[in-house]
Image (spheres, rainbow, N blue to C red):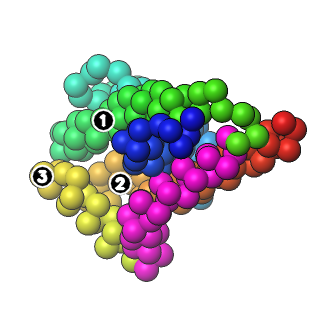
Amino acid sequence: MYKKTSPFIKILTYILWVPVILSISFEIITFSDWIYTYNWSRNNISNNTGLSITELNHSSNSIKDYFKNDLEKLEIIITQNNNNYHLFKDREIDHMVDVKSIIQSTLLFEKVGGILLIIFLIMLFYNQKLKTIEENIRKIILKSFFLWGAFLSIIIFGMMVNFNYTFILFHKLLFRNDLWILNPRTDFLLMMFPQRFFLEIAIGILLLFFLINILILILGKIIQAKF
């Protein structure tokens, strides 16, 4: 069935595999509680911001909720000394509107792309013997990696050589304004999430991406051995 399937379906599968697995890895890492807890301690965020761990956790949870809800503006209220105040300034809030748009687009692609990928895989492997699936999954992964290899290599190379430059370039490409240029000394968004946090999130996404692919290949080997 794999050989008889339309070449167009195969090509679409190769195109979708890497970005879909990357987007899955992105959601898992970005919305995991532990990455934020790790950031608070590793980067000494509580001391740098004057916020307690409870307040930091409340803020990160509110941000994660904001990325998935329908609210236009992010509003986080912090109470200290019986006074309520907004954690983020207008510029930070406006920037988060842009960030939310990108994240929701990524999550939408993950869902639509994931559904299409599953459909294409079913079309490719329908009526196929289980022991041949591992070989064909391996072909899909390798060809998708070959297709996206240059893109992945540029990202990894940029992170290794000069993450600061890569980080700035990433923002210039994705955002059509300069709202992302904030003051790390006065703006809580940067004080809470310094550049090293994003470096470690990027590393986590890439590691999980490769781990998922490796686990799929191992699972395929197990299926092949048993059948």
Crowding near pointer 2: few (<14 within 10 Å), some, many (20+)? Answer: some
Spot occupied by residue 15 in the image (x, y as percentages of width and height): 40, 48
Which one is earlier in the sequence, the residue at label 3 or at label 1?
1
Q: 129 or 116, which lies in front? A: 129
- Under mark 1, the amino acid is Ser
Q: Residue furthest bottom?
A: 161
Q: CA distance from mark 1 to mark 2?
A: 23 Å
Whether residue 34 is situated above or below residue 49 in the rendered picture: above
Q: CA distance from mark 3 to mark 2?
A: 17 Å
Describe residue 206's horizontal placement relative to residue 188 as left or right.
right
Report the residue at 36% width, 35% height from top.
Answer: 109
Quarter of the C terminus within the rendering? top right
Crowding near pointer 3: few (<14 within 10 Å), some, many (20+)? Answer: few
Q: Which residue is mark 3?
A: 177
Q: Is residue 122 magenta?
A: no
Q: CA distance from mark 3 to mark 1?
A: 18 Å
Q: Quadrant of residue 28?
A: top right
Q: Which residue is mark 2?
A: 190
Task: Choose mark 1 or mark 2, whichever is in front.
Answer: 1
Q: Which residues are magenta?
A: 133-161
Q: Which residue is mark 1?
A: 105
Which one is earlier in the sequence, the residue at label 3 or at label 2?
3
Q: 113 or 107, which lies in front? A: 113
Spot occupied by residue 83 in the image (x, y as percentages of width and height): 35, 28
